[in-house]
Image (tube, rainbow, N blue to C red):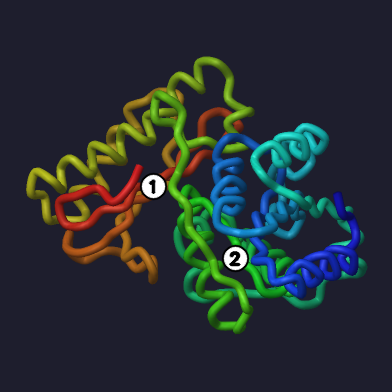
Amino acid sequence: MIERVAELSGALEAERVRGRVVGLVPTMGALHDGHLSLVERSAAECDTTCITVFVNPLQFGPGEDLGAYPRALEDDLRRAAGAGAGLAFAPPVEEMYPGPVMTTVRVVPLADVLEGEHRPGHLDGVATVVAKLFAMAGRCRAYFGEKDWQQLVLVERMAADLSFPVEVVGCPIVRDLDGLALSSRNAYLAPDEREAAPVLFRALRAGMATVMAGEDDPAAVVDLVGSIITAEPLAQLDSVALVEPRTLAPATTVRGELRLLAAARFGRARLIDNLGLYGNAMMGT
């Protein structure tokens, strides 16, 4: 385990000097099988895999769960090593932010829509910490899950715009047997909320099914998904959107590649999920 930026940069540069390909898996810890699938993918494609474990305060707004966010570093390190990680970067906050943060990274308009509307500043915090990690890591492949679709698109664009020597790799969502997308925040769910939470995936699947049946009105698809989530008493709907996958602009027709996204609260857990659509076919689950 590495805690210092200089040590991380030196260790990864030494790997590259030896001709080894470096894989990077940025996380906030509380690792689940979705995270581990990223580590396993990196380990299969790269010579050296480094996982980062850092609960980034910049991406939490007032009243959000920074203090309560699950932390289990010792278990995270054990599980990451078992999945193929050779290095772990787990810095203290003062190492990542040694003084007041006067520079942030903002990706517009990608940071202003969807999650940006519901969590102002959140995606600026994500872009800033990922930019710092890319600068520290140097040339590498960086692995992100598709569950946070907006984050993945934003990171891809940020890396391209700022000319980071990083290949951003998106990886499929990992789900529980009942369809619930794995998330560290699932730990917040009470038993009845956990039973209700798969409604997100069921609603998205219903949206996909209506597209396959010929629905070509984006508003009708969005309304259907929202109505299914709203019908669940323990779900408080935040948003549903059908968007162009790379620009996140609202879809004007149900044609070509699209992304269907939903967010809802179950007690103190705010969960997100999405599906990719192309014409009348689902891209991935």
> What is the x, y in percent for residue 116?
53, 61
Residue furthest left in the image: 214
- Between 69 and 166, the one lying in front of the other is 166
Task: Give amino acid for label 1.
Answer: Asn
Residue furthest front in the image: 18
- Between 230 and 137, the one lying in front of the other is 137
Task: Report, in whole angstroms, how far the alpha carbon at label 2 lies from the one at label 1.
Answer: 24 Å
> Which residue is at a point 55% across and 15% down the rendered structure image?
191
Disc 2 to disc 1: CB gap under 8 Å? no
Residue at which label 2 appears? 141
Near mark 1 (Cα within 10 A), the count class, few <14, some 14-19 or many ≥20, is many
Residue 30 visible: no
> What is the x, y in percent for residue 234?
45, 24
Vertical position of residue 169 compared to residue 35: above or below: below
Residue at which label 1 appears? 274
Q: Quadrant of residue 123?
A: bottom right
Q: Quadrant of residue 15?
A: bottom right
Give the side of residue 183 with respect to residue 137, left or right.
left
* Helix, strand or loop at mark 1: strand
